[in-house]
Image (cartoon, rainbow, N blue to C red):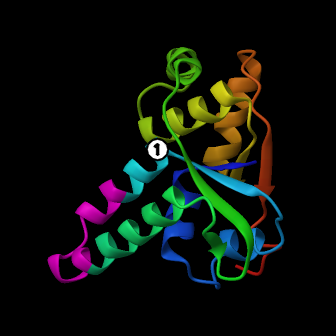
């Protein structure tokens, strides 16, 4: 099982096979556990879209949520991975307080998603960006270890 961050979840909801996250997922034979805060980040981003686009985007998000609810729905057509939704558990609540103290409040959706992964002891799936690497280094320095499977967008051809 692996938990994508908010940016990665946005790419999954987009479902374009051209995106680095989708190309990476095509090689996984695993359950992709979407953290509820990452879905909230996607919905938040869609809220700023022009009204003409917002309807289609929200429909896409609705389809994705239905896929998460149906444990037999494959995430990429015929093949794995399968998607499921991870809620905010008591372990995530405890982790969030620690993570927020380290990372601050500049990106609460990511901090909450990291907390879900940490609380469930499940690795994150993150694009290798300076911001994501800095977050993981800061957390590790504070004694908060979260496993990460990195996607190198340059190696993926992006």
Quadrant where the C terminus sits is bottom right
The residue under the point 48% across, 31% down is 88
What residue is at 75 percent from the left and 70 percent from the top? 80
On the question of residue 128 being in view, the answer is no
Q: Could you say where residue 144 lies in the image, as x and y percent from the top left?
A: 72, 20
For the point 44% across and 52% down, which residue is it?
Answer: 39
- Residue 130 seen in render: yes
Q: Is residue 108 magenta?
A: no
Secondary structure mostly taken by the magenta-highlighted segment of the chain: helix
Picture quadrant where residue 119 is located: top right
As helix, strand or loop, the secondary structure at mark 1 comes to helix
122 versus 25 height, above or below: above
Whether residue 105 is situated above or below residue 130 in the rendered picture: above
Given the current orientation, which residue lies at the most extreme left position?
51
Check residue 51 for magenta coloring: yes
From the viewer's side, name the closer residue of 147 and 36.
36
Residue 41 lies, in percent from the top left, at: 40, 51
Apparent side of residue 102 relative to residue 38 in the rendered image (left or right): right
Neighbor class of circle 1 (other Cα within 10 Å; few <14, some 14-19, many 20+) is some
The magenta region covers 43-55
Q: Nearer the viewer, residue 128 or 89?
A: 89
**Mark 1, residue position:** 36
Residue drawn at (24%, 74%) of the image: 54
Q: Nearer the viewer, residue 35 or 151?
A: 35
Classify residue 148 as left or right of residue 72: right
3 is higher (above) or lower (below) than 103: below
> In the shown orientation, is residue 102 left or right of residue 139?
left
Position in image of residue 106 (x %, y %): 42, 35
Quarter assignment of residue 127: bottom right
Q: Is 18 or 59 nearer to us in this picture?
A: 59
Could you say which quadrant of the image residue 142 lies in? top right
């Amino acid at each position: 099982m692996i938990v994508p961050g908010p940016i990665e979840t946005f790419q999954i909801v987009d479902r374009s096979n051209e995106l680095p996250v989708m190309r990476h997922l095509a090689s996984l034979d695993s359950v992709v556990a979407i953290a509820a805060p990452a879905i909230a980040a996607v919905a938040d981003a869609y809220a700023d879209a022009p009204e003409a686009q917002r309807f289609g985007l929200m429909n896409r998000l609705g389809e994705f949520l239905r896929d998460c609810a149906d444990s037999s729905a494959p995430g990429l057509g015929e093949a794995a991975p399968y998607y499921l939704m991870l809620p905010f558990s008591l372990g995530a609540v405890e982790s969030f307080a620690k993570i927020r103290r380290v990372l601050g409040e500049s990106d609460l959706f990511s901090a909450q998603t990291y907390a879900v992964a940490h609380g469930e002891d499940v690795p994150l799936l993150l694009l290798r960006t300076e911001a994501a690497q800095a977050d993981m280094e800061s957390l590790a320095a504070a004694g908060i270890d979260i496993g990460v499977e990195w996607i190198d967008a340059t190696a993926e051809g992006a």
